[in-house]
Image (cartoon, rainbow, N blue to C red):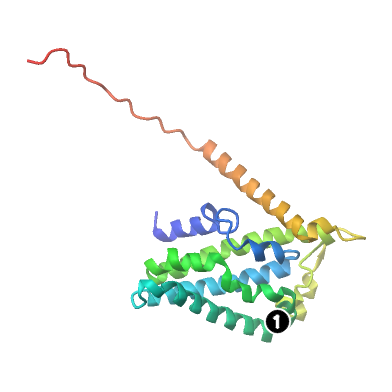
Amino acid sequence: MSKYSEIAKQGLWHNNPGIVQLLGLCPLLAVTATVTNALGLGLATLVVLVGSNILVSLVQDYVPKEIRIPVFVMIIAALVTCVQLLINAYAYGLYMSLGIFLPLIVTNCLIIGRAEAFASRNSLAHSAFDGLMMGLGFAAVLVVLGAGREILGQGTLFDGADLLLGEWASVLTIQVWQVDNAFLLAMLPPGAFIGMGLIIALKNVIDQQIKARQPKVSAPAVERARITKVS
C-alpha cells in the first residue's frame, strides 16, 4: 500500500478529525444548522489546512524546535486572515453568517495538530496531501451533520446556497418536507450533539461489520520438542 493511499484512508475514515479524533468540535457543532454554513466553514478550514501544511513542511528545516509552535501559529493566523478577507469580499452573506467562527479557525486544534504531528516531519507532497485528506474528511462530517439538522429543523436542503455560490445558486434549495414551525432541538446546539453522537455510532457499527466480514487468521501451531534425557 502506497503512503498516499494510507494518508487518504487515515484522513477520510480511520483517523477522521471530526468523528475519530474529535477535533474542532466548537465550529462543527455551532455552525452546522444548514448545509451552506457547514460547507462554507469546511472549505475555509480545508484551504487553511492545506496551506499551513505546505508552509510548515517548507520551513521545517529552518525553524528551531524551541520556537516551532509560535511560528506555526503565525503561519496559520496569516492564512486564516487571507481566507477571512476573501470571504468578506466575495461572499459577504456567508461571512456574516459564520461570524466569529471564521477567525476562530486559528485556534482549531486540528490545524495546529497536523502541522506539528505530520507536516513538520514529512515531505512537501505528503504534507499537502495529508492536509487535503484531513480537510475533506472534516468538511464531509460538517456537511453530513448540517444536512441532517437542516432537514429535521426546517425541512429544506441547501437553503441559502446563494450566500456561498452566488445568486444563481438560489435554485439549488430543495424543500424536502413542509414545516410550519422549525424543530428547535435540531437547530440548536443540543441537536448538534445528538446528531454528532449518531454519526459516531454509525461509523462504529460500519467498522464492526467490516471487521466481522474479514477472514479470521488462525495463529500458527507451535510444535514443542520434549527433552527427556541430556547426555
198 relative to 46, above or below? above
Residue at x 77%, y 70% (from the top left corner): 172
Residue 170 location in percent, x, y?
A: 79, 75
Residue 211 or 88: which is nearer the viewer? 88
The answer to whether residue 176 is visible is: no
Residue 90 or 231: which is nearer the viewer? 231
Residue 61 relative to residue 78: left or right: left
Q: Residue furthest top?
A: 228
Residue at x 60%, y 58% (from the top left corner): 18
Residue 195 relative to residue 68: left or right: right
104 relative to 88, above or below? above
The amino acid sitting under disc 1 is Ala
Residue 4 location in percent, x, y?
A: 43, 61
Determine crowd level at label 1: few under 14, some 14-19, many 20+ residues with C-alpha closer than 10 A: some
Quarter of the rendering containing residue 223: top left
Residue 100 relative to residue 186: left or right: left
Residue 129 or 110: which is nearer the viewer? 110
Asked which secondary structure carries label 1, the reply is loop
Q: Residue furthest left?
A: 231
Residue at x 40%, y 30% (from the top left corner): 218
Quarter of the rendering containing residue 28: bottom right
Residue 104 location in percent, x, y?
A: 62, 73
- According to the picture, the residue beneath numbered tag 1 turns out to be 91
Residue at x 87%, y 61% (from the top left corner): 182
Residue 224 location in percent, x, y?
A: 25, 21
Q: Specify the quadrant that holds the C terminus.
A: top left
The answer to whether residue 82 is visible is: yes
Q: Residue furthest front?
A: 66
44 relative to 21, above or below? below
Quarter of the rendering containing residue 96: bottom right
